[in-house]
Amino acid sequence: MQKNLKKDAVFVLAAMVAFLVLLIFALPAAAAVTVYAEGAYTGDDLVVYVYADIDTDAICSAGVKLTYDNTVLTVDSAVKNDAVWFMGDSSPGHSYMNPEDAGDGVIVICGKLDTSAPTDGVIGDRVLLGIVTFSRNDGGAVPPDPAVAEDYFGVTVELGRVDPFANFVTTGGVELDADADPVPLEPVAFTGATVRERGDANGNGELTTQDMAALRYYIVNGGIGEIWKDCNGVDGINTQDMACIRYKLTH
Ligand SMILES: [Ca+2]
Ligand SMILES: [Ca+2]
């Protein structure tokens, strides 16, 4: 009797393992890391936030190039997110490579090695990699199509440095770059940039009273706080930004 029970248990275990293996291979290969940028402009400047959704495995390094059109933009400042990406026992830790302006793009390299938790790495949604601030050298022209202002500013995201450099690496040592050899099963995905005017809270390319409603909804209910909801460009997103939109609509 006992022997049969043991046999049954082994069988159940084997069936579970077989099922799990099937499940793993049947799942669609969603990208483990997705990189994107969100930017907001005024007549004077453009501020772009670079984010990563890191879903499956924690990563210990990230490298992104934020491209821009240097006929309309000049880099004012570029910072990496030291609060999350640091090497040492706490932020900011040991200093390492700061973002570099390559003339047509800013390369942001991020590393994480928390000496008190060396295997942790970084994982999660909307993890900020860095922030790049541009001044506009086009006189503040209105983009031809404000609903895709990213095209006008030439802003997009791609791999920071090309092979043989590794940009995105998991804490397990797996390189996720699409140009890695061998190419990983789920290479890092770049889904581009979105740029809107500050105060275009619903992000549709025009400033209307709808944006006040969208901002009010966000303040009450929460949601995704894209930078274009920060109409006045200070203190995050709050009721002052409602007043800012109202001002923009009436002036
Ligand atoms: Ca709008
Ligand atoms: Ca604000």
Image: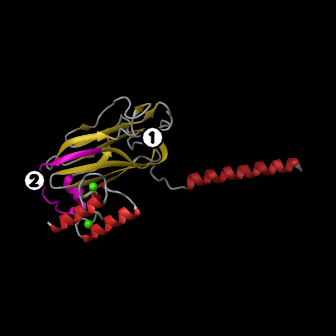
Q: Residue at x 83, y 50 (%)?
A: 5
Marking on residue 139: 2
Quarter containing ligand 1?
A: bottom left
What residue does disc 1 label?
A: 59
Q: Position of residue 57 (x, y in %)?
A: 49, 44
Residue at the limit of the structure toward the left, as seen here: 139
Mark 2, residues whose alpha carbon is within 10 Å: few (<14), some, or many (≥20)? Answer: few
Start-end of magenta stretch: 131-153
Residue at the limit of the structure toward the bottom, as seen here: 209
The answer to which quarter of the image holds residue 195 is: bottom left
Q: Does residue 221 sit above or below 23 in this rendering?
A: below
Q: Residue at x 34, y 29 (%)?
A: 95
Q: Which circle's residue, 1 or 2, is located before the other in the chain?
A: 1
In the shown orientation, is residue 27 left or right of residue 159? right
Mark nearer the viewer, 1 or 2: 2
Judged from the image, the secondary structure of the residue bearing numbered disc 1 is strand
Display coloring: secondary structure
Q: Can residue 149 be found in the magenta stretch?
A: yes
Q: Residue type at mark 2: give it.
A: Gly
Q: Is mark 1 within 8 Å of ligand 2?
A: no
Q: Residue at x 24, y 49 (%)?
A: 47
Q: Residue type at mark 1: give it.
A: Ile
Give the position of the C terminus as an image quadrant: bottom left
